[in-house]
Image (cartoon, grey):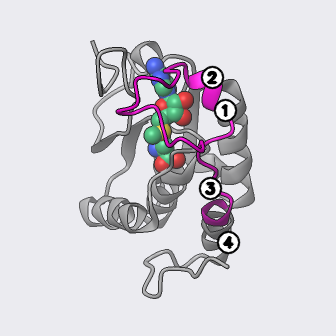
């Protein structure tokens, strides 16, 4: 059983419940991830079942930084099944309104992230863009307050998948 962070800044029970569920269903490939493992596929579609999500202490930091900055528009590369998005979207709502612009290339993960946000009651605070973030994040519609780069290994070692 996953134990919620004892002093979590996430006060909303619906949000905390979705985060807790994602924590206990955190599948990883038996051989670890593709980062640093050249024998493994680098195709994100081969990992549609794995989130590779941030950990709770990282999410708590994101939430508190966004609250402290009074952030209203934030961006993440990439979304996966929406763990980091939940922390961002919770901060946007608790700041009085705002949007996290997410990006994810694997369609099944986009759908999972949207379901998770809806279950947490945070769907109105997220704009999840499906496709290659190098394209989908080109137009952010204006300045942003905070960006998380949580990318994917390229063919020649770790990369942010930026050009
Ligand atoms: C480390 S995970 C992101 C985890 C997420 N921030 C979370 O906390 O749940 C990296 C994600 O990048 C996605 N990805 C890989 N290449 C991408 C690209 N070019 N554009 C958008 N997403 C990409 C993968 O499918 C994978 O889900």
Residue 90 in magenta?
no
| Marks 1,2: beta carbons within 8 A | yes
Point out the frontmost of discs 4 and 1. Answer: 1
Q: Is mark 2 within 8 Å of ligand 1?
A: yes
Q: Quadrant of residue 19?
A: bottom right
Is residue 32 found inside the magenta-colored segment of the image? yes
Left or right relative to 49: residue 148: left
Q: Nearer the viewer, mark 2 or mark 4?
A: 2
Query: Which badge, 4 or 3, comes first in the chain's sequence?
Result: 4
Residue in the foreground of this view, choosing between 111 and 65: 111
For label 3, the SS is loop
Residue placed at 37% from the left, 26% from the top? 153
Q: What is the CA distance from the residue labelled 3 to the residue labelled 2?
A: 17 Å
Tell me the residue at 66%/32% (across/down).
48
x and y percent of residue 158 in the render? 30, 28
Mark 4 and mark 3 residues within 8 Å of each other at the beta carbon: no
Residue 110: give its label: none
Instruction: Indicate whether 12 appears above or below 76.
Output: below
Whether tag 4 and tag 1 are in contact, CB under 8 A, the answer is: no
- Residue 45 is left or right of residue 87, and the answer is right
Residue that badge 1 annotates: 48
Q: Which residue is mark 2?
A: 45
**In the rendered structure, which disc, 4 or 1, sits on the residue that comes first in sequence?**
4
Cα gap from disc 4 to disc 3, whole angstroms? 14 Å
In the picture, the disc for residue 26 is 3
Mark 4 sits on what residue?
17
């Amino acid at each position: 059983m996953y134990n919620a962070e004892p002093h979590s800044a996430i006060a909303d029970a619906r949000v905390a419940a979705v985060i807790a569920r994602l924590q206990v269903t955190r599948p990883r490939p038996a051989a670890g991830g593709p980062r640093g493992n050249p024998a493994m596929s680098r195709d994100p579609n081969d990992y549609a079942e794995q989130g590779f999500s941030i950990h709770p202490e990282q999410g708590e930091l994101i939430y508190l930084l966004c609250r402290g900055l009074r952030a209203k528009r934030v961006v993440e590369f990439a979304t996966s099944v929406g763990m980091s998005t939940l922390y961002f979207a919770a901060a946007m709502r608790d700041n009085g309104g705002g949007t996290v612009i997410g990006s994810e290339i694997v369609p099944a993960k986009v759908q999972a992230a949207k379901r998770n946000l809806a279950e947490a009651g945070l769907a109105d605070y997220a704009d999840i863009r499906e496709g290659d973030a190098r394209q989908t994040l080109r137009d952010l519609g204006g300045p942003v307050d905070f960006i998380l780069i949580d990318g994917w290994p390229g063919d020649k070692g770790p990369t942010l998948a930026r050009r």
